[in-house]
């Protein structure tokens, strides 16, 4: 493919910004437009459930770049104007305000939209947490002794519960799994997380599905469990996962199946690529994959930029995410699962400093470090051979 004369990036966040920056770093001189649904300059999401939610950071600190750095990028940022349509054949993007942007390459980097519970939209006091505005709205309601129910026992729910508890709220975590992150990390680590949350005063009402919300005069009053029990609440945070933000791609000609379906080079169609949380691509050794984590957003954007410039690079990362809950800093490499065999290879879970290795069919599939980042990174090496395709 010849070098494109213009690139349109849809999504002005981690993956979108990293794509534009990588193109410039590699010497690309054509036009770059970055279209963003939100009015804000690109900001980072991981601090939203931690430092921004706790109030430790002024929201401006979550910005990914200064205005000067963005200006030096020589990209047009079209913000607060979501893309509403893409024609993959002609590689044109239409925005809500009616602008039409065309390029020889288009990058879809629109991330995720949070799932919601039936009836939550009509009730005040019910929150999701995906955007800066979401974080500030929730922050405004988190006070000492306020009764918060977090619906969802995954990474995001557990982080929000920890931060809200740190602010003195009375926090209950609810969800169908028996312990936080049980589905992702298996029983050994999940039970340690359950102990940590319980010790710090988070009430765990796990193992029962949530069927709905109760309210009065338009304000939420509780969370109804599958058992019929109602957990009283002043504030509810719904953290039950998210779906790829692909609604705007209807009729685009792209294949969408839990993400924008791409080949092993992150290409969805001729000249059309996807990066970050929204992208489902063919990992040469791990199969069809879509990752929802910060590191992937940037690494995949780099691969996309390379491929826009003609590199034909297969994208084969070792997956990685981290999570911070109370004083636990957890680093996870590879694809651990609830069914893997888990062994502690460094440290001691009782002392809350350890590295665990996940194995399936005798093969290393994941490494988890709990307050042992350096050692976890060293053990990551055990995954590289399994994940890197033979040349
Ligand atoms: C609260 C929170 C905490 C997190 N903590 C961690 C963590 O500790 N560790 C970790 O590894 N990962 C964490 N993550 C995940 C990480 O932030 C994401 O993986 C990363 O932001 C993905 O980047 P992205 O650019 O693909 O998508 P996003 O960051 O979701 O960006 C997509 C952008 O596209 C915009 N958009 C959507 N639709 C359109 C449209 N039609 N037109 C134009 N723009 C559109 C959105 O408004 C958004 O700005 C966290 C996520 C959240 C929400």
Image (cartoon, grey):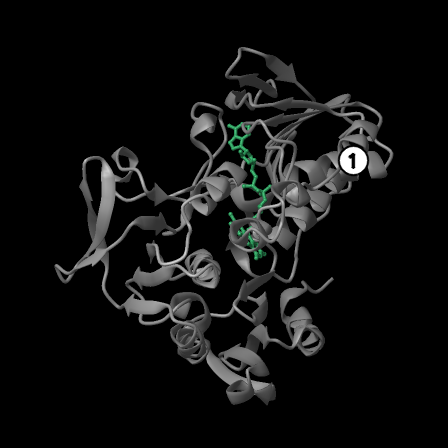
What SS does tag 1 mark? helix
Mark 1 lies on residue: 23
- Kindly give the residue lying farthest to the front in the view shown: 144
Quarter placement of the N terminus: top right
- Count of marks, rendered view: 1
Q: Residue at x 83, y 29 (%)?
A: 72
Q: Residue at x 28, y 63 (%)?
A: 176
Task: Give the image location of residue 16, x and y in percent.
Answer: 65, 36
Q: Quadrant of ligand 1?
A: top right
Task: Give the image location of residue 182, x and y in percent.
Answer: 39, 70
Q: Residue at x 69, y 50 (%)?
A: 299
Q: Residue at x 56, y 51 (%)?
A: 55
Q: Is residue 5 left or right of residue 112?
A: right
The one nearer the camera, 40 or 301, is 40
The one nearer the camera, 282 or 165, is 165
Which image quadrant for residue 193? bottom left
Label 1 neighbour load within 10 Å: few <14, some 14-19, many 20+: many
Task: Give the image location of residue 117, x and y in percent.
Answer: 28, 44
Task: Give the image location of residue 133, x and y in percent.
Answer: 50, 37
Quarter placement of the C terminus: bottom right
Q: Is residue 176 left or right of residue 246?
A: left
381 to 287, vertically: above or below: below
């Amino acid at each position: 493919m010849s070098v494109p004369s213009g690139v349109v990036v849809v999504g002005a966040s981690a993956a979108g910004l990293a794509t534009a920056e990588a193109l410039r770093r590699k010497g690309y001189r054509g036009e770059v437009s970055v279209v963003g649904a939100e009015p804000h300059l690109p900001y980072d999401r991981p601090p939203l459930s931690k430092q921004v939610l706790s109030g430790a950071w002024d929201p401006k600190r979550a910005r990914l770049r200064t205005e000067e750095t963005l200006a030096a990028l020589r990209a047009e940022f079209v913000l607060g104007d979501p893309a509403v349509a893409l024609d993959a054949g002609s590689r044109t993007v239409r925005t809500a305000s009616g602008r039409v942007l065309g390029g020889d390459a288009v990058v879809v980097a629109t991330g995720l939209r949070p799932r919601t519970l039936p009836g939550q939209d009509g009730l005040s006091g019910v929150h999701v947490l995906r955007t800066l505005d979401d974080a500030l709205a929730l922050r405004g309601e988190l006070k000492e002794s306020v009764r918060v129910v977090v619906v969802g026992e995954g990474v995001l729910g557990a982080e929000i519960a920890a931060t809200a508890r740190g602010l003195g709220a009375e926090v209950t975590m609810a969800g169908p799994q028996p312990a936080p992150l049980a589905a992702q990390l298996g029983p050994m680590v999940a039970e340690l997380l359950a102990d940590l949350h319980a010790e710090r005063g988070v009430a765990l009402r796990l193992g029962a599905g949530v069927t709905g919300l109760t309210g009065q005069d338009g304000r939420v009053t509780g969370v109804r469990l599958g058992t019929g029990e109602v957990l009283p609440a002043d504030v509810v945070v719904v953290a039950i996962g998210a779906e790829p933000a692909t609604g705007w791609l209807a009729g685009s000609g792209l294949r969408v199946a839990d993400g924008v379906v791409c080949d092993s080079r992150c290409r969805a169609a001729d000249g059309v690529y996807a990066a970050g949380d929204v992208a489902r691509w063919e990992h040469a050794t791990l199969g069809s994959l879509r990752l929802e984590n910060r590191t992937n957003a940037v690494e995949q954007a780099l691969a996309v930029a390379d491929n826009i410039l003609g590199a034909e690079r297969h994208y084969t990362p070792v997956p990685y995410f981290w999570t911070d809950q109370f004083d636990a800093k957890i680093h996870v490499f590879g694809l651990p699962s609830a069914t893997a065999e888990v062994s502690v290879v460094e440290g001691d879970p009782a002392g809350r400093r350890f590295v665990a290795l996940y194995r399936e069919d005798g093969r290393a599939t994941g490494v988890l470090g709990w307050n042992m980042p350096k050692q976890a990174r060293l053990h990551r090496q055990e995954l590289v051979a399994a994940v890197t395709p033979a040349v």
